[in-house]
Amino acid sequence: MLDCLAYRTARNSVHAFRSEGDEIVVRREVVASPGECESLLQLGIDAYAWLERANRDIVTAIRQGQTQPAAELDRAIEALYRMWLPSAATLEQISQQIQHEDPPPNLSRFRECEQLVREKVAEFDKLRSLAKRVPSASDLSLIEIDPREWLSEPGWSQ
């Protein structure tokens, strides 16, 4: 599934958005014009849309049996969501531009995308935290439990 068009486009879009945002910081200057700021925000919005589409297409393919769930897919999508998040320095540069000019018309949509990505990354973090708490099969095999003990619990039957 990592070779599907939606994933490739999402990967390329996220890389372009991150690269352009980082370039602003490297130049250490306020975005050159309101149009350039608007274009950067649009790049982020478009990258988010492709990322969501790639994620949806992968989930759909798994549900329809076209592909198997794989840790590789999960890691790849998670990495793109994390990469999408602009650095604090990039956000500061955008904020400086907005202070000097009227906010670009796509600012609110960009902020929505940013919030949704932050929520998604928080979900990944929560799942990772929960996964650390679940004992592995090898850990469980070390626990010696007589099946008769848990079969005698109310609600369980032999």
Image (spheres, rainbow, N blue to C red):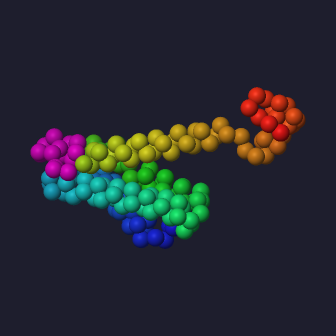
Q: Is residue 100 above or below residue 41?
A: above
The structure residue drawn at horizontal position 78% and vertical position 41%, both measured from the top left corner, is: 140
Q: How many marks?
A: 0
Residue 154 % position (x, y): 76, 28
Q: Classify residue 155 as left or right of residue 127.
A: right
Q: Is residue 47 above or below residue 153?
A: below
Residue 107 % position (x, y): 21, 47
Instruction: State yes or no: residue 51 in magenta.
Output: no
Q: Is residue 3 above or below residue 71?
A: below
For the C terminus, give its image quadrant: top right
- Is residue 9 in view from this perspective? yes
Q: Nearer the viewer, residue 16 or 30?
A: 16
Q: Classify residue 62 as left or right of residue 96.
A: right
Q: Classify residue 130 as left or right of residue 113.
A: right
The structure residue drawn at horizontal position 73% and vertical position 44%, both measured from the top left corner, is: 136
Q: Classify residue 109 as left or right of residue 49.
A: left
The structure residue drawn at horizontal position 30% and vertical position 59%, both measured from the top left corner, is: 46
Q: Is residue 100 above or below residue 149?
A: below
The structure residue drawn at horizontal position 23% and vertical position 42%, both measured from the top left corner, is: 95
**For the magenta stretch, what is the residue range?**
95-108
The residue furthest top is: 154
- Is residue 20 in view from this perspective? no
The residue furthest left is: 102
Residue 151 % position (x, y): 82, 34
Residue 104 % position (x, y): 16, 49
Q: Nearer the viewer, residue 63 or 70?
A: 63
The picture quadrant where one finds residue 96 is: top left
